[in-house]
Amino acid sequence: MTKTRRNNLNIYDDVAANWWSDDIKWVRTLKNMVPGRLKWFDRHIDWSGTSVLDLGCAGGFMAEALADRGAKVIGIDPAAQAIEAARSHAAKAGKDIRYDVGLGEDLPYPTNSFDAVVCVDVLEHVTDLDQVLAEVARVLRPGGTFLFDTINRNPVARLAAITIAEDIVGLLPKGTHDPDMFITPAELTATLSHAGFDIGPQTGLGPRGINRRFDFTFGPLPSKAIIYMGIATVPLQLQ
């Protein structure tokens, strides 16, 4: 029996040609999560005129939503074909978004480049969390905001994200996540603090309903047991 490859990031390039087609259920799931994330993120930041890095942007769902809110957006992702799909769709839609191929551990931007960094469905995939957060802190301006979500590490999250979402329901391809790479809120808070961030509020994220295609819709939840969102800021003056 072939063992499932975990943390398989090739999936984003594999479906790049159909990223915006709405033909692939798990890609629609990622798209459907964007409004739920922004329902909470919007409470904590005014996007208009803000320079934003979408770290781990894949095919551009979040980047385009932020551009629609008036942000000046750059997206970056290691999946080159997904980046090309994002560029193509933005061009066709007349959206002025820059997309780069690159890694969170080595961001190709000067220090103090952005007012905000958005990083969703990414931190549980990176090889060096400390380095990624250090890079985020570096490219943010003093007072800048880091907005993120990730998956908690516990038996309930493993059951929901791996057994149910990947193996049974097919909300994501098998092997998308490695449960050993999930991050508890306490661990992430400690790593953010070590990187120099001031820690802001956190909340859960999960299914809130079903749409006409019988896909889940998403929104904020009180429980952080499975997916949780959070805010952190770079101090105006580093200590």
Image (spheres, rainbow, N blue to C red):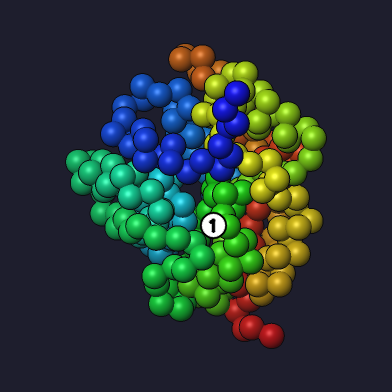
Residue type (three-letter) at the residue carrying disc 1 = Ile
Q: Nearer the viewer, residue 24 or 61?
A: 24
Q: Nearer the viewer, residue 141 or 29?
A: 29
| Above-or-below relation of 120 to 110 | above
Residue at position x 70%, y 65% in the image: 191
In the picture, residue 102 is in which quadrant?
bottom left
Q: How many other residues sit within 10 Å of disc 1, few (<14), some (14-19) or many (≥20)?
A: few
Mark 1 highlights which residue? 45
Residue at screen point 70% across, 45% down: 180
Rendered image quadrant of residue 206 = top right
Instruction: Please name the residue shown 41% across and 45% down the image.
Output: 58
The spot of residue 128 in percent (x, y) is 60, 62
- Would residue 43 be visible to someone looking at this image? no
Label 1: state its secondary structure. Answer: loop
- Left or right? Give the position of 230 relative to 94: right
Q: Residue at x 66, y 74 (%)?
A: 196
In this rendering, position of residue 134 left or right of residue 46: right
Q: Is residue 100 left or right of residue 213?
A: left
Return the x and y of residue 32 as percentages of the image width and height.
Answer: 49, 31
The x and y percentages for residue 184 are: 75, 50
The quadrant where residue 19 appears: top left
Q: In which quadrant of the rendered image does the N terminus lie?
A: top right
